[in-house]
Image: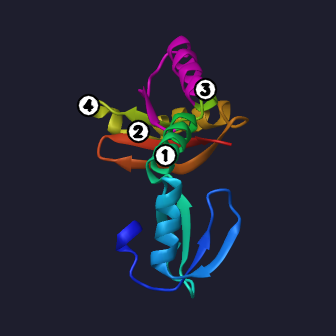
Amino acid sequence: MNRQIRISPVRVIAADGSQLGIMEVDAALASAVEQGLDLVEVAPMARPPVVRIMDYGKFKFETAKQARLAKKKQHVIHLKEVKYRPGIDEHDFVTKTRNAKRFIEEGNKVKVTLMFRGRQITHPELGRAVVDRVAAELAEIAKVESHPLMEGRSLTMILAPK
């Protein structure tokens, strides 16, 4: 920017976007100062380097404003967790599955965790049946991202929106 530009000559672009041609840095800087603007290097790797006459403070403000708007519009995917037990009752199963469905419809991933207690671990097939039933219930709106996997005393599976 301004006096920090070392390589001369440079290709100059005016504030309105028109080409001013190739000139020495001092002449381009004088032209920028005359207009009350800054001389900013926009393509340093080009031969000759390209500089633009612009209001640098306004340019920085506009790029920061665009970055804020882009951040505001983006959707971050969260991982929500729904916990089940092997001997879960029908009503509880429906309620938890409804919550999982709501999370997926919001665009989030769902971690289905089935926890075993005490001697329930001796019958992992009962837990797998519950997890498979959840996957079947949500098959139309979600896909299985990671298949059921035993981790200690719990069986976990991750569902993602289709």
Q: Residue at position x 73%, y 35% from top?
A: 140
Is 90 placed above or below 53 here? above
Q: For marks 2 and 4, give the CA distance.
A: 11 Å
- Left or right of 136? Residue 4 is left
Q: In the image, which disc is placed on residue 101?
A: 3
Q: Residue at position x 35%, y 40% from top?
A: 154
- Left or right of 40? Residue 141 is right
Mark closest to the chain's N terminus, 1 or 2 = 1
Q: In the image, which disc is placed on residue 123?
A: 2
- Residue 82, by quadrant, is top left
Q: Which scheme is used to colour this image of the protein?
A: rainbow
Instruction: Determine the residue located farthest toward the left in the rendered image.
Output: 118
Total marks in image: 4
Q: Amino acid at mark 4?
A: Gly
Mark closest to the chain's N terminus, 4 or 1 = 1
Q: Nearer the viewer, residue 55 or 153?
A: 55
Is 69 placed above or below 45 here? above
Disc 2 vs disc 4: Cβ atoms closer than 8 Å?
A: no
Q: Nearer the viewer, residue 10 or 121?
A: 10
Mark closest to the chain's N terminus, 3 or 4 = 3
Q: Amino acid at mark 2?
A: His
The region drawn magenta spans 76-103
Q: Which residue is mark 4?
A: 118
Question: Marks 3 and 4: which is nearer the front?
Answer: 3
Q: Which residue is mark 1?
A: 58
Mark closest to the chain's N terminus, 3 or 2 = 3
